[in-house]
Image (spheres, helix red, strand yellow):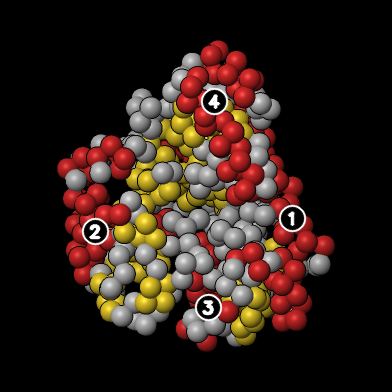
């Protein structure tokens, strides 16, 4: 077992990893920016090291500072969490070169699956359906227009590297393609340092379904079933649930096995999420793989009873997967709401400030993952997500009822949050009837 790791992240995921480390007898070293110096979770770490000012580029994205902290702290490994450097191939390679275990996939697998164009080719190689699209990156606007007229609209322009909706544009005709193509490339270049984009057929009103997988260095892999992430705003997830409520047993098994084929072919190790679009006929199409632990991993933990961070730590320690797939079982329904410091009535504008009143919900089946507290100041320097509210119940109807109650109990003042928006969505009759897709929020709110 690893004895001491550094957590190259902040906030709730840093706290989550600290707790998992301590339960496995591993020492946890936290890093922090000057803006986070008073974060209470730092006191739970075995050591805390300042890595720079509030600006991400000078702290949490500063590879030299993080590697220096790892060397000073004499750690065995680095856990990147999600976001920041979690999918940065250069960072993973530097960890390897420095003899520090990167708690994630091998560099080769990360590079392969991190490039969406190459990932599509891999999926096709192992007979997993992909959304019809370009064979590779599109070099210029003229090439994009020629291909678009062959494929037919609507289409979606997507960044070859990265995710989170950046470098992504839906286009319906030549005019919108011309205006969106260079904008998508510029946004991808700014976000990921790679302006490559490709085209895909835009599937109208799909569901976004992803499969959680875990693989070891001996080629063993398991899936932990799927999550439905269709409730999104501008390609950013708001509410997730597991299992996907429209999948029958046969389609679920097919989907999960398809995810495993991709992961095994890539020579993957650690946690990954394989993402698909599901059309109205329940036909599924691979779209990308995320080479890290996901924000929404708690919903999977709740329905399977497995701690995914501990799985990552054990695999990074060299443990092989001993469980068989039949030992990974689904129980009940879990729903997660992301609580962001944003004002839903003002186009979800960021709402930083000091929290003067904080009352989290509780009760049976309720879990809150957060690092904030009364007196905490939400900074403009970082992502606006401040908490994740997760509920677990026997049925979807019961989970919805519990989530509504928990959201109504949750008090975070005086800043604005997405709690009212989540309540509105969970109270909408189409959500209750399970008639949703990735355009549900824009269409109904």
Q: Are marks 4 and 2 in contact (CB under 8 Å)?
A: no
Whole-angstrom CA distance, mark 4 to mark 1, is 33 Å
Tell me, yes or no, if residue 365 can be seen here.
Answer: yes
**Which label sits in the foreground, 2 or 1?**
2
Give the number of the disc on residue 178. Answer: 4
The picture places residue 262, in percent across and down from the top left corner, at: 61, 38
Left or right side of 249 for 18:
right
> Quick one: label 2, few (<14), some, or many (20+) residues within 10 Å?
some
Q: Mark 2: which secondary structure?
A: helix
Q: Secondary structure at mark 1?
A: helix
Q: Secondary structure at mark 4?
A: helix
Residue 18 figure quarter: bottom right
Residue at label 3?
36
Mark closer to the chain start, 4 or 1: 1
**Which residue is the site of mark 2?**
420
Bin the neighbour count of mark 3 within 10 Å (Cα to Cα): few under 14, some 14-19, many 20 and up.
many
Location of the C terminus by quadrant is: top left
The residue that label 1 is drawn on is: 90
């Amino acid at each position: 077992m690893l004895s001491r790791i550094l957590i190259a992240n902040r906030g709730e995921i840093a706290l989550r990893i600290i707790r998992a480390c301590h339960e496995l007898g591993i020492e946890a070293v936290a890093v922090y920016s000057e803006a986070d110096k008073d974060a209470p979770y730092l006191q739970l770490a075995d050591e805390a090291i300042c890595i720079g000012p509030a600006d991400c580029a000078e702290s949490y994205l500063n590879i030299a500072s993080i590697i220096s902290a790892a060397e000073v702290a004499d750690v065995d490994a680095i856990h990147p969490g999600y976001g920041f450097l979690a999918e940065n191939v250069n960072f993973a390679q530097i960890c390897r070169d420095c003899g520090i275990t990167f708690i994630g996939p091998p560099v080769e697998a990360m590079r392969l699956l991190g490039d969406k164009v190459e990932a599509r080719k891999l999926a096709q190689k192992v007979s997993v359906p992909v959304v019809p699209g370009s064979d590779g990156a599109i070099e210029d606007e003229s090439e994009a227009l020629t291909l678009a007229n062959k494929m037919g609209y609507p289409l979606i322009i997507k960044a070859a590297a990265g995710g989170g909706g950046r470098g992504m544009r839906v286009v319906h005709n030549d005019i919108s393609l011309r205006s969106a193509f260079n904008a998508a490339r510029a946004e991808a270049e700014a976000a990921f340092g790679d302006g490559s984009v490709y085209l895909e057929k835009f599937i109208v009103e799909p569901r976004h379904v992803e499969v959680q997988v875990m693989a070891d260095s001996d080629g063993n892999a398991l899936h932990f079933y799927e999550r439905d992430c269709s409730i999104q705003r501008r390609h950013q997830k708001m509410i997730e649930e597991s299992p996907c409520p429209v999948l029958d047993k046969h389609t679920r098994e097919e989907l999960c096995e398809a995810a495993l084929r991709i992961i095994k072919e890539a020579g993957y190790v650690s946690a990954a999420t394989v993402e698909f679009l599901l059309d109205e006929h329940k036909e599924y199409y691979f779209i990308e793989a995320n080479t890290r632990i996901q924000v929404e991993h708690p919903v999977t933990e709740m329905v399977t009873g497995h701690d995914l961070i501990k799985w990552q730590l054990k695999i990074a320690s060299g443990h092989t997967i001993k469980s068989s797939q039949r030992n990974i079982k689904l129980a009940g329904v879990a729903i997660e709401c992301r609580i962001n410091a944003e004002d839903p009535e003002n186009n979800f504008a960021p709402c930083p400030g000091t929290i003067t009143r904080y009352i989290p919900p509780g009760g049976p089946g309720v879990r809150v993952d957060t690092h904030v507290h009364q007196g905490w100041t939400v900074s403009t320097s970082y992502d606006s997500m401040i908490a994740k509210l997760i509920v677990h119940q026997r049925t979807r109807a019961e989970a919805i009822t519990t989530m509504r109650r928990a959201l109504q109990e949750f008090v975070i003042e005086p800043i604005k949050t997405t709690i009212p928006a989540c309540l509105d969505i969970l109270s909408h009759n189409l959500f209750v009837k399970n008639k949703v897709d990735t355009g549900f929020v824009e269409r109904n709110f």
